[in-house]
Image (cartoon, grey):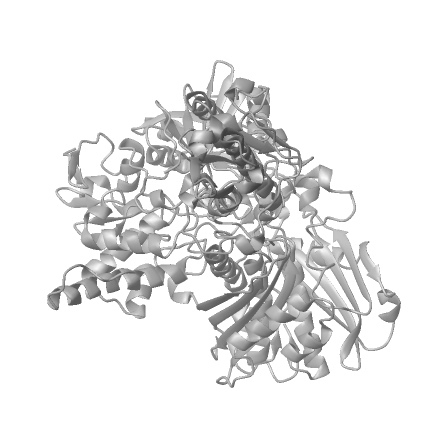
Amino acid sequence: MHDTTLTRRNLLRTGAIGGATLLVGVNLRTAAIAAAGPEAGAISGAAFAPDAFIRIGTDGKATLIMPQTEMGQGIYTALAMIIAEELDLPLDGVTLEAAPASDKLYGNPIFVVQATGGSTSVRGYWMPLRKVGASARAMLVQAAARRWGVAPSSCRTEAGRVLHDASQRQATYGELAAAAMRETPPASPVLKDPAQFRLVGHSRHRMDTADKVNGALKYGIDAMPAGVLYASLMSTPVLGGKIAKVDDTKAKALKGVSQVIVLDDMVAVIGETTWAAIQGLAALDVTWNEGPMAAVSTATIRDALHKAAQQDGLVALDQGDALAKLRDGAVITETYELPMLTHAAMEPMNCTVSLKGGKCEVWIGTQVMTMAQRAAAEEAGLAPEQVTVYNHLIGGGFGRRLEVDMVRRAVRIAKHVDGPVKVTWSREEDVAKAPYRSVYAAVLRAKLEGGKPAAWAHKVVGPAVIGRWLPPAFDGKIDMDAVDGATETPYDFPAQHVDFVRHEPQGFVNCFWRGVGPNLNVFATESFIDHMAHEAGTDPLVFRRSLIGKQARARAVLDLAADKAGWGKPLPARSGRGISLQYAFGTYLCTVAEVSVADDGAVRVTRLTTAVDCGTPINPDGIVAQIQGGTLFGLSAALYGEITMANGRVEQSNFNDYRVVRMDETPQIEVHVVPNGEAPGGIGEPGTTSVQGAVANAIYAATGVHLTRMPIDPSLLAKGKGKSGATKA
Amino acid sequence: MPAISINGTAHEVSVDPDTPLLWVLRDALGMTGTKFGCGIAQCGACTVHVDGQAVRSCQVPVGTVGDSKVVTIEGIGASDPGARVQKAWLDLDVIQCGYCQSGQIMSATALLASTPNPTDADIDGAMAGNICRCGTYVRIREAIKAAAARKTAAKKTADAGEQGAQAHA
């Protein structure tokens, strides 16, 4: 199994012992291909390491320097398949190394910074990695052709060898690597004809899981540098609060507790085991100065949101004079709302830090290598180059590990500890004090003419997460993530207006959550579409079909999902089906949910049928896995997900009161992948964003109650609450 | 404290006997395959076997282990059902992030050891205590059935006097 904690040091060592090695990279900004071997300068950096993505050694194996973080989404396998495809290597001829921290060398082509999120990895690296692979293959062919005195065009490649059929000669990539590094990379590498793909589009087993069935894989939380001590922390229960005083007498008397560290907004206990530290923390008597956030409750947060929703937003899209058309007549209006959420990744937040002799080492699983490095440097008072981040495979990201608050806290603690310290968040600390997905609202307005919307307006109310997280990508006006799924829909509206009211709930760090902006906009759009269909007296499937014009891919996934779900077939009383159709992350996707609602309002989702067109599929079974998991992630939110506040404190603490879907609540899930040759779309998020609308619409069909807020409130669904008419809830 | 038996090996530990087995495994012994997830027996990530029973190691004080035999994810492959479960997990590409899967595999193996051909209801009952945030439940269910079928098929083959297991998950 490839080492998942590879570091710059390991990288250099591998390069140094690799002997004659062909290195090929691509400049992600200019798309220029570069190649060199060790003679061109140690790969220590200057001469070639820039943009190095693959290395072919004398053993003929290709090493892919993996810029993206594996957090379960299958990116290690997908990107390895792409490079192996163009290189004409078997998949097991590719090994993976985690890239070191460098935005310059390994910045995500879409974000520019080294970040894994937003379903961007395959979208961003599809063409660059194909070009790298094709360039390396061309150079190997040139080297063989020169050796044999034949035309490169008379040679072919197969399974890690260059072959010259006419003379029945062949050479392995390993034999050719040294010679190939003296060849010039082609100016414009010839990419493989997709008709010849033997890996891309064919399901392959994951490359990251062999060590996940036997406990061998080390996540960040498993890091154990020599001499490590263990820390448990408690931060202010009310955001912005400060410590007034701490009585640590009892804690210090406990066996195994070695140190109590009191900082201005948190306290940490250091112990010989994490358990000792947890016990020490529990034995502390801490008095807090709560500060102004103590008055915050879910009611005040929602009030502020709805107040913001009454403002006009900045215009993100305006076509067909929609607002004028909605000025009078029978305008239908509805407001949709999403709650605060936490991510609840299975691997609790953690970060291990060693500060010694002007150097800082950080062991962590992060979606943002360079941000983690910079955060550690800032807190330690060092330059980023003095900080080494050892990234690990991640035990669940979902956007939580796009934040680096855990790095900052761990470094602040480590500054007071002699030797390395592993800081592990308790589940309660993570659930009750995390950065959260904010509340959001969408105000939808439309007018029906001839049974179809003549005009459509969609106001998005929520934070500008990109504005905080990636300021260069924010124009100060429209947050592209916030309006994603609102400006682009599967439908051709004759007139459409989208505006954005930036609303940042005061005092919170508002962060990304799997599915990001489209979680709101797909839920709102698809719920409102069903509401319109209801008003028009039209079947929701027929209604959607009538609104799809140019986007044939949308119609294809709609029809396929509806067909596979048995749309229109009779169901028992208080059961129903609901559709959600979307275009987001470059992917078309339709989910049909089937639900049954008990007389007391309890909802059981019995079946989810999804059709997805994400363009060229890389690993089809991996796509199925992402939709299966993504829809369940969305289902947890639809059924249960909500962080509530009272007196400035979060009211949830652990999986007992922040519920998520379990095995016995899992519906039958079917996924149908529609392959086509378009550019690959994202696949980690789209399943998640389709569920809330599909389930809400199924409940609408089952009960007549049009839910406008997530999570589902069963008390609104008890028998007798809904009727055939639209009951707003 | 007397030594405790983990995966057939005796380990001396010098921690407070109240320390949960989870933290003894992870921090005192460096056996990090067993995962911390919630600390209150709600998620199942820390599941190990004590005398063949699946238990949440975050709730087992190490001082209560005594002579019992502890098996963790690092040792589960040595048992027949454990090896079948691991293979089925890989064959069906169950795993995504993998963090919960140590616990899932331990629960699934205990289920198969006691119930060789589990029904869906058996699977719900045995696995509902193990949370997976990546949402791999669909495949976990399939993989448990595949692991069970391997044994069933292999047994039938043996009964029929044929050579070689033809079963494949």
Q: Is residue A592 left or right of residue A165?
A: right
Q: Is residue B149 left or right of residue A400?
A: left
Measured from the top left, where is residue A91 in percent x and y? 43, 45
**Figure quadrant of the C terminus of chain A:** bottom right
> Between residues A675 and B84, which one lies in front from this camera angle?
A675
Residue A368 visible: no
Farthest-out residue, top: A357
Measured from the top left, where is residue B164 in percent x and y? 17, 59
Measured from the top left, where is residue A213 in percent x and y? 32, 47
Q: Quadrant of residue B22?
A: top left
> Between residues A111 and A506, which one lies in front from this camera angle?
A111
Instruction: Name the residue at 87% across, 70% down.
Output: A325
**Figure quadrant of the N terminus of chain A:** top left
Q: Is residue A84 left or right of residue B23?
A: right
Rendered position, A398 above or below A700: above
Count of numbered tags:
0
Instruction: Name the residue at 84% across, 70% down.
Output: A326
Rendered position, A316 above or below A425: below
Q: Is residue A535 left or right of residue A664?
A: right
> Between residues A646 and B86, which one lies in front from this camera angle?
B86
Residue A538 visible: yes
Rendered position, A117 above or below B158: above
Q: Quadrant of residue B61?
A: top left
Measured from the top left, where is residue A509 in percent x and y? 62, 42
